[in-house]
Amino acid sequence: MRIAIIGGGLTGLTLAFYLEQAGVPYDLLEASPRPGGNLLSPRAPEGYQLEAGPNSLLLSTELEELLTELGLQDAIQEAAPVSQHRYVLRQGQYQALPASPPALLASSFFGFRTKLRLLAELLRRPAPPVPGETVAAFFARHFGPEVVQYAVNPFVAGIYAGDPAELLLSLTFPQLATLEARHGSLLRGLAKGPKTGRRRTVTLRGGVQTLTDALAARLRAYQPGQPVTAVRRLAGGQYEISCAGQPQPALYSHVALALPTYAAAELLAPQFPAAAAALAAVRYPPMTLVYSAYDRAAVAHPLQGFGALNPQVEGTYSAGSIWTSSLFPDRVPTGQVLFTSFVGGVQFARQAQEPEATQLAAVHAELSRLYGISGEPRWQGRAYWAQSIPQFDHQLAAARAAVAPLAAEGIVAAANWQAGVSVPDCVRHARQLAQQLAPPGK
Ligand SMILES: Cc1cc2nc3c(=O)[nH]c(=O)nc-3n(C[C@H](O)[C@H](O)[C@H](O)COP(=O)(O)OP(=O)(O)OC[C@H]3O[C@@H](n4cnc5c(N)ncnc54)[C@H](O)[C@@H]3O)c2cc1C
């Protein structure tokens, strides 16, 4: 048995790490000279520690174990306590989003009619899943349109770069479908569920890329700068893998595609055209992150929180901003604040593709208006992803169904479109896959 892992992002690196621990032979082929894929933590010369991909991590058990195994436990950095507070734009003003259903009933964030719907939701009876239901339709059924517009919509834009009217509940929040089937009411189900406590919001000193750098440094068979150009199934069932950087193809018994769907589609197209077509149809909207730093004294808003989201209905330029300097104060020179604003995703796709100068000016104007900022930024910059986060919609369901049968032929898919986009999801999925691939007794 020998496995070719194609793609050295977080999923491919984690898969390789656990295969190596299990003594399974593999090669990890990464196109770029840099490991990590979406985990990218540039440091601006002006002294700002930035993140171009994940800005914060929810510390799951598997992620903490991986960090410990890599000797990175001392690199874990907690978010400041103010990060529990989240803000949402309503009629041009940022309002704190109540953190729990009781707090919600007591606050003025939602109107009287929505509060009545929240109480009525407690009376819902268990119900089977509605096939093909979208996230927006599910929440509208439970809580009404105001919750969809002002809570679900900005949350889904902020985390999934998506539109809740398109994402499928069964793929995006499968645990909520289970709660409905068991309890009917989500509020009752959540109250009765296990009290696991709040997961810690953390980052890593030096940026989240520290994780993927450490993984790559530990692996014996990590090969950077090796873009795979062809995957060919031979008559005996083995796979021949060709790389732009290697004169001869190499042979493997299994292939793990730790790639975005569009990259996997190119490799599968010659021999598995139906699966390739389904993979190519998955949507990845563009996303620009705009960084804006100001003198603290120039910003009227207290910025006591994680950040703020802008529901689409408010007609803003950006989907919202993380208040990076409130979350992780040591990432910014003393006396300054740093906003990381998200321009893009399905709902803001047009703005994501505008020229850099337009984006920086538009974000500065919007921040000035919403946060009471006087004067010009101390510094601005941006990071651009032409294809950011896979959308968990009907196309993705079709793509998963199309690649599932390939497992019987020795091709497995391991990436954020298989088992969840978050960093903890990628780690959990890669670790489970390594266990499945390791022969018994290994
Ligand atoms: C802007 C943004 C913000 C995010 N924010 C968060 C957050 O705050 N918290 C969180 O938990 N998650 C966040 N995520 C999600 C998370 O970062 C990703 O889901 C995860 O890192 C994906 O890892 P992956 O290994 O599955 O894929 P990728 O990171 O896409 O890695 C795929 C790798 O395959 C390589 N490759 C492509 N083609 C080939 C080829 N032909 N041959 C060889 N190699 C190839 C690529 O170079 C790349 O390194 C964010 C993602 C983005 C884009």
Image (cartoon, helix red, strand yellow):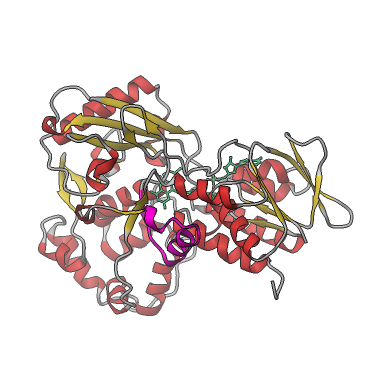
Residue 277 lies left or right of residue 115; in this view the side is right
User: Eyeballing the image, is 34 above or below 414?
Assistant: above
Chain part drawn in magenta: 56-75
Q: Tell me which corner region of the image, top left, top right, bottom left or bottom right, holds residue 114.
A: bottom left
Please say if 191 is above or below 278: below
Is residue 58 shown in magenta?
yes
Which residue occupies the foreground of this view, 24 or 380? 24
Q: Residue at x 21, y 47 (%)?
A: 88
Query: Looking at the image, which is closer to me, 348 or 322?
Result: 322
Say left or right for 377 vs 213: left
Instruction: Identify the image quadrant of the N terminus.
Output: bottom right
* Depth order, front residue of 112/392: 392
Direction from residue 281 to residue 143 in the image, left or right: left
Quadrant location of the C terminus in the rendered image: bottom right
Residue 322 visible in the snapshot: no
Image spot of residue 15 (x, y percent): 60, 57
